[in-house]
Image (cartoon, helix red, strand yellow):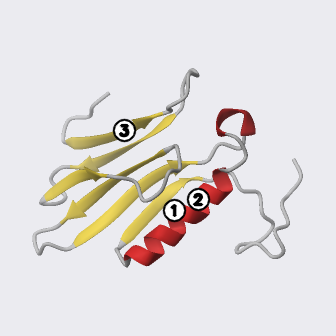
């Protein structure tokens, strides 16, 4: 569904299941332009756009969803997020990463990888 005055960037869940996916709305008067760009990794549920302002400064914005269920994409979601962060760091680009990563750590950054029990 589009909203008047906003650009829509959308990535549906690429598996044969009901629901899922991510979307990002950007107010189209906010910037000179917003364009969809390729993801920085093979992480399955992410959408990226590049925001470019009047002074030609570029910033990448993403919405990601990491499902806690291994029956959708397997158990490699954490590895794929790490690859995405490594790629973003290496790119030296300005970025904003938003999402639901479904981690249940007691502290951040995690100390010794302790995860809260459900």
Query: Which of these two is toward me, 15 or 117?
Result: 15
Residue 72: quarter of image: top right
Residue 50 location, quadrant: bottom left
Q: Where, quadrant-wise, is the N terminus in this rendering?
A: top left
| Pair 3/1: label in front | 1
The spot of residue 99 in percent (x, y) is: 53, 53
What residue is drawn where x is 81% and y is 66%?
106
Residue sitting at x 54%, y 25%: 19
Q: Is residue 117 left or right of residue 102?
A: right
Q: Which residue bears the numbered disc 2?
A: 81
The image quarter containing residue 52 is: bottom left
Residue receiving disc 1 = 84
Q: Which residue is mark 3?
A: 10
Residue 18: % across, % down: 56, 20
Q: Who comes first in sequence, dot 3 or dot 1?
A: 3
Secondary structure under tag 2 reads: helix
Q: Residue at x 50, y 33 (%)?
A: 13
Q: Secondary structure at mark 3?
A: strand
Task: Residue 55: give x, y in percent of width and height.
Answer: 11, 75
* Whether residue 10 is situated above or below residue 59 in the rendered picture: above
**Element marked by disc 1:** helix
């Amino acid at each position: 569904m589009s909203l008047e005055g906003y650009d829509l960037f959308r990535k549906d869940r690429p598996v044969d299941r009901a629901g899922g996916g991510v979307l990002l709305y950007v107010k189209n008067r906010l910037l000179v332009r917003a364009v969809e760009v390729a993801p920085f990794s093979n992480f399955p549920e992410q959408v990226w756009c590049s925001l470019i302002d009047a002074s030609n400064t570029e910033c990448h914005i993403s919405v990601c969803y990491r499902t806690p269920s291994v029956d959708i994409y397997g158990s490699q979601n954490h590895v794929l997020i790490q690859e995405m962060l490594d790629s973003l760091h290496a790119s030296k680009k300005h970025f904003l990463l938003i999402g639901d990563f479904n981690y249940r750590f007691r502290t951040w950054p995690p100390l010794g990888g302790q995860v809260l029990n459900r």
